[in-house]
Amino acid sequence: MQFIADFHIHSKYSRATSKEMNLESLDKWAKIKGIDVLGTGDFTHPAWFKELKEKLEPAEAGLYKLKEKYAKEFQKSGGDWFDSKKQTRFILTVEISQIYSKGGKVRRIHNLIFVPSLETAGEINRRLGMIGNLKSDGRPILGLDSKELAKIVFDVSENCFLVPAHAWTPWFSVFGSMSGFDSLEECFEEYAKYIYAIETGLSSDPAMNWRLSKLDNIALISNSDSHSAQKIGREANIFDAEMNYFSVLEAIKSKNPDKFLSTIEFFPEEGKYHYDGHRACGVSLKPEETKKYKNICPKCGRTLTIGVLNRIDHLADRPESGKPKRAIPFKNLIPLDEIIAEALDMGVKTKAVAAQYQKLIAALGTEFNVLLNAPIEEIKKAAPAHIAEGIRRVREGKVSISPGYDGEYGKIKIFSEKERKDMAKQKALWV
């Protein structure tokens, strides 16, 4: 069966996350978005792990679902504009932050762990709890080498899965320009052979990663890394396989294009670290410009944050058009509420945008169905024509973007200034 999965999120126990990042709210928004399998995130946090044990029950092998009493309780206030009866599947995941010294350099690496059962998660928690404080944050910070983390995880169970998170982010990733490595082997040593996938992150997409031939046998997965329920699914994965933990992992490991169909991606320019730059000075640079300035900010003389595009250029052995023989396809999208907001020339969190969003979901099923599958003519029946036109342009990649840099999200535009002025004249008819 075909389904969409987002494996990497955070709970309310992680820093800078919404208080609504609880299982009931996540279940609701997964239904609205059209996400069938959702990572739990943060299973190492004692309070969150307690909630997982209390509120989840086994479903298909290695997957869980919200117990009926919790699902029903939330349905009462869920509204009737989405399918509240559909059951979300949860997969046990956690992101570990590691800070340690290796090769004469401080490394800051984030790794994502998948496990097949609460019992397995409990044993990993026990072992990691002997190393660091798991209560401090949903994404614990441990002074643990990635090789040692892999050893612990795979010693607990060969069915665990370890994936370097947002693999190109400058400050906290396996290939990060500021604290990473040049290869998986350098990071994980003898355990590199058990690393079957990396997470591309918001500032890169698969086409950028295809430029490295050493990643040809590595699957490229994409997840939201969401800190709020409404942002789950901003990146995700599409499968056509049996819906269980083991089938999902096998589809990823094998890179079988009949089972791992595609990934859903940000436009990478929209990510916070696509270009090089210095946010304090408002300096954003292409890699060739950074080279000209010798990695130094031309305004203040401090070192620039080297972004993902530059880092990939540095490690790549293929041109920009390069592509391996076995490459899983991908689709660049913009979240539906952002498309609506631009079409209405309003803020994403306004009541008018929420009303149009709910109207589309009620008419066409889920956000992903609206973004990926629904005919444009059907969308026009449920929303103003400019919203339908915005969705069409996003599907075709017809957008303009001022790339993100040094922690600043890129600014993406679907409509020209003239079109925006014309739409503003019609706004009163839409809201």
Image (tube, rainbow, N blue to C red):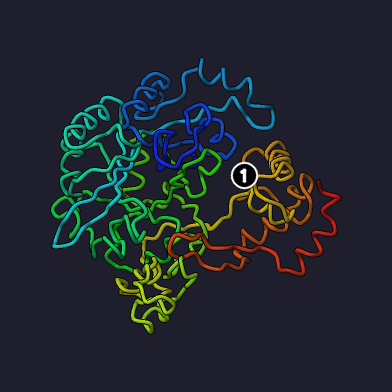
Q: Quadrant of residue 76?
A: top right
**What residue is at 41 percent from the left and 24 percent from the top?**
59
The residue nearer to you, when weighing 45 against 380, is: 45
Residue type at numbered disc 1: Asn
Relative vertical location of residue 299 with respect to residue 52 in this rendering, above or below: below
**What residue is at 20 percent from the left and 56 percent from the top?**
187
Farthest residue toward the bottom?
292
Farthest residue toward the top?
69
Left or right side of 231 for 189 = left
- Which secondary structure, mark 1? helix
**What residue is at 50 percent from the left and 30 percent from the top?**
88
**What is the x, y in percent for residue 108?**
26, 54
Residue underneath mark 1: 369
Q: Residues within 10 Å of mark 1 (few under 14, many from 20)?
A: some
Left or right side of 333 for 348 = right
The residue nearer to you, when weighing 13 against 32, is: 13
**What residue is at 15 percent from the left and 45 percent from the top?**
148
Left or right side of 331 for 176 = left
